[in-house]
Image (cartoon, coloured by chain):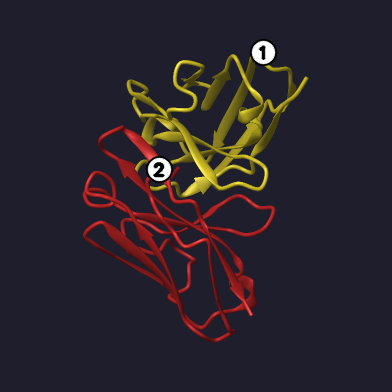
Chain colours: A red, B yellow
């Protein structure tokens, strides 16, 4: 049972916008940075957002994120078929001194 | 080019031990924390353990605490994960990744299968 909550799946048509939520608590998201990872089928995860809303070099600005209180949100605009993947949020859990991942959200581009 | 490469995976019997290695190239482990993250077949990512850049601190996930040990050999730029008393629930692809608050570079993973 993850300390973070994500919807199991989201879907949208090409070109549309989709958001993925990540809910936690005051001891994890509430006091620590959130990062987001994209995992394409059969590949290692890839960092797409760090420090709540920063994009690594090479990640298009179609990917954005925000954090408010104990929740975070990843937004992807101008959806492409290549965006179909599992997306995970992650943060540090201060009460347990562990890094935690959300259960993941599968994005389907219809 | 910054790269991480895991090795050491394989088939191991329940209760036995296995050591995984993560070799870094293009950067030094002295400068970054290193994590192990695993993914069971068809499941999500599970964080396993982290060792701090100075090697002084290690934090373990609940599922592996007391059974797994992380260590590093700085001259060899290698981090190890010593797995003991493995169970079928430890079957997964094991990834190493670097940094602290976020994991910006990942290896390709090494597969561990626990089976009799």
Q: Residue furthest bottom?
A: A15
Badge 1 crowding class, 10 Å Cα cut-off, few under 14, some 14 to 19, many 20 or more, is: few
Residue A70 vs residue B114: left or right? Answer: left
Residue A47 horizontal/vertical position (percent): 48, 56
Q: Which residue is mark 1?
A: B16
Q: Quadrant of residue A14?
A: bottom right
Q: Is residue B40 or residue A51 the one in the foreground?
A: B40
Secondary element type, mark 1: loop
- Residue at point 38%, 55% (across, down): A35
Please give left or right for residue A4 compared with residue B69 in the image. left
Residue A40 left/right relative to B100:
right
Identify the residue at horizontal 73%, vertical 17% (top origin): B13
Same subunit, labels 2 and 1: the answer reads no
* Image mark 1: chain: B
Question: In the rendered picture of this protein, how many numbered marks are placed on residues?
Answer: 2
Q: CA distance from mark 2 to mark 1?
A: 27 Å
Asked if residue B83 is positioned above or below residue B5 in the image, the reply reads above
Marker disc for residue B37: none
**Rendered location of residue B86, percent (x, y):** 62, 19
Of residues B46 and A35, the one drawn nearer to the viewer in this rendering: B46
Label 2: few (<14), some (14–19) or many (≥20) C-alpha neighbours in 10 Å: many
Q: What residue is rendered at 60% in x and 46% in y? A: B43
For residue A100, which numbered disc appears in the image? 2
Q: Camera-side residue: B55 or A23? A: A23
């Amino acid at each position: 049972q993850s300390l973070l909550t994500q919807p199991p799946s989201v879907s949208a048509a090409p070109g549309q916008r989709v958001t993925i939520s990540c809910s936690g608590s005051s001891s994890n998201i509430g006091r620590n940075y959130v990062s987001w990872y994209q995992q394409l089928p059969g590949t290692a995860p890839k960092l797409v957002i760090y420090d709540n809303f920063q994009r690594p070099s090479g990640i298009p600005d179609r990917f954005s994120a925000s954090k408010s209180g104990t929740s975070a949100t990843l937004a992807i605009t101008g959806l492409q078929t290549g965006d179909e993947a599992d997306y995970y949020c992650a943060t540090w859990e201060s009460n347990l001194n562990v890094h935690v991942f959300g259960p993941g959200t599968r994005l389907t581009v219809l | 080019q910054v790269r991480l490469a895991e090795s050491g995976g394989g088939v191991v019997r329940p209760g036995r031990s296995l050591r995984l290695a993560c070799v870094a190239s293009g950067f030094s482990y002295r400068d970054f924390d290193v994590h192990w993250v695993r993914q069971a077949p068809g499941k999500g990512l599970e964080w396993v353990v982290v060792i701090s850049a100075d090697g002084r601190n290690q934090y373990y996930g609940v599922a592996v605490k007391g059974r797994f040990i992380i260590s590093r050999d700085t001259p060899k730029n290698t981090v190890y994960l010593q797995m003991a008393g493995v169970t079928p629930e430890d079957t997964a692809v094991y990834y190493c990744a670097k940094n602290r608050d976020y994991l910006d570079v990942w290896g390709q993973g090494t597969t561990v299968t626990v089976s009799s």
